Image: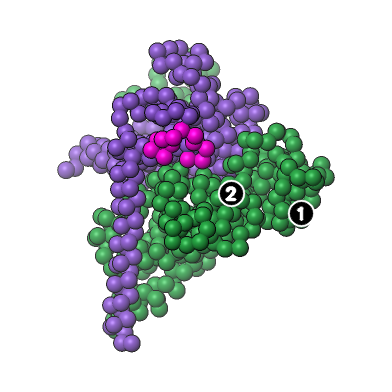
Chain colours: A green, B purple
Amino acid sequence: MNHPVQSDKPEGDRLSRFPKHIREEWFGRVYVYACVALLIVTIFSIVWFIASRGLNPFISGGLNLSDLLFGRQWNPEGEPPLFGALPFLAGSTATSFIAAAIAAPFGFCAAVFMTQIAPKAGRSILQPAIELLAGIPSVVYGFVGLTVIVPFLRNNFTGQGFGILAGSLVLSIMILPTVTSISTDALGTLPAGLKEGSFALGATRWQTIYRLILPTTLPSLLTGIVLGISRAFGEALAVQMVIGNAPIIPKSLFESAATLTSIITLEMGNTVGGSLHNNVLWSLALILLIMTFLFVFIVRVLERRAKR
Amino acid sequence: MKAKTADRIAIAVIVAIACLIMAVLAALLGYLLFRGVSHISLHFLTSEPETIKTGGGIGPPLFNSIFLLVLTMIITVPLGLGAGIYMSEYARANRVTDFIRLVIEVLSSFPSIVVGLFGLLVFVQFFHLKYSLISGALALTVFNLPLMVRITEQAIRGVPREQKEAGLALGLSHWKTIRSVMLPMGFPNIMTGTILAAGRVFGEAAALLFTAGMSSPRLNFSDWNPTHLSSPLNPFRPAETLAVHIWKINSEGLAPDAPEIAAGASAVLIIIVLLFNFGARWLGRAIYRKFTATK
């Protein structure tokens, strides 16, 4: 090994003031600082670029905020064009919350199974299965939704099968790994004495689970659910493939609807850059961005409560 | 109801749900493979996609996906390593570090479509890279970087403290210790994490719709000069990846055999992602065994 201690070879006056190990340390530092700086630049430029386009409709006076947020009609080609995004907000919110409502109990049960009931089978079978679910690409989920869930709903219920429920079902499988892994972590870090104390008092496993484990880990479980909702809210293609893409507020779960992501996916490529229609789509992207910040904020608050 | 009965019922329900999750996964994989594998042939894997005729293949999208993955990893890995090393070794416990942690958390929770739209504004339009592989690779880098940082940080943190102290005690600089002692020690974990991240990149579509584009020019697979437009290796050409191709034929496929092509392509995608998953685990274990000489 070459020793980076002061070398006895003359390296020239300028370099000898900075021996090799100092120079290489500086190189390393500059490199890692540059990488981190790039991360920070990236996030600011994401916010800057999307906000500058997304705020355009309001600044240029083409649209005011309440029309966008509370307008029930989306008709960009109409006379006058109408840009009410309420159907998309409603669609995104409904699909992601229903998906979380389905995934939450499943995720909690899976976590209980893995940590309390059968840790061995859980670790060797269920855990890898859940990790595989997390690895399946979203377009494949969309394809399965389109060829299995939509026809199933069409044949067994009213409507065409496309709609909020189809979207929620697909999303619930997609976010199950998120919910499960966070719940498993929370249950795994529970002090063993707590559980043993409960058993020693004569409580059954179920009593211990719902009287003790559930309340104690609730903030962490909620973190998992919020992360799941956040992922569902931003998921684009899988939802777009099964939701039907009708820009209306549906009256039932079996009617075609649309989400923020689905409308952006469909219309961004077909509009002329700089037109009001195009700019309003950027406003929708800005709403997605703001929702992300909101979800991160909620997760942080919950994590702080979980630590106490 | 007696507590014991309630306990039995509840536990049975929980076990049933765990079995149900397994069943859903098995059904999902079984369905995809059952429907798709029969459609996979050498012709399907190598021929051009068709828009209206039957018999289209997935040759170019498959190639694009692999090439894009390589490009993305070439950009992501050095940046992710750098930032991950900073977070584990150089970051002090102060507000700046908290802020950087927040940045990474936010960056990793951005929906992939938002990252794609950012790519459209910045790489495609602002830097005039047009719809191209390189725009797609840069967008995927934004999407993948936070994960890579986290993988590196955890791997480096997992290195025993004594190893680092021994390096420093020998008079090595901090950077030299990281590079020659800690990175090799953390390498198995970094490798596993990177392959898993690669699987995620391989299946990503939403971030690519508006960056790498939704169509490919006719490719000439005998021309390997990267500067030619029809060369497969040209990073400045538009490229439709396998995941994007699946989305496109499902939503606007006109070919009569579109469902079969979608099924075949999904099966190929799933098989590759599974290979990534199992490969990562296997390789991680193998490298660990080699490095530590344990059985």
**Left or right of B61: which side holds B42?**
left
- Determine the image quadrant of residue A282: top right
Front residue (pair B68, A30):
B68
Q: Position of residue A205 (x, y in %)?
A: 31, 76
Crowding at dot 1, Cα within 10 Å, few <14 / some 14-19 / many 20+, comes out as some
Is residue A270 rendered magenta in the image?
Answer: no
Q: Chain of mark 1?
A: A
> Mark number for residue A245?
2
Where residue B133 appears, x then y in whole percent?
51, 26
Q: Secondary structure at mark 1?
A: helix
Label 2: element kind: loop
Looking at the image, tell me whether mark 2 or mark 1 is earlier in sequence order. 1
User: Which of the two discs, 2 and 1, sits closer to the camera?
Assistant: 2
Residues drawn in magenta? B250-262
**Chain under numbered label 2:** A
Residue at 32 percent across and 71 percent down: it is B13
Relative to A18, is B187 above or below? below
Please state which amino acid type lies under the numbered disc 1.
Answer: Asp
Q: Magenta segment, principal secondary structure?
A: helix
Which residue is labeled 1 in the image?
Answer: A67
Task: Check contact, mark 2 vs mark 1: CB within 8 A.
Answer: no
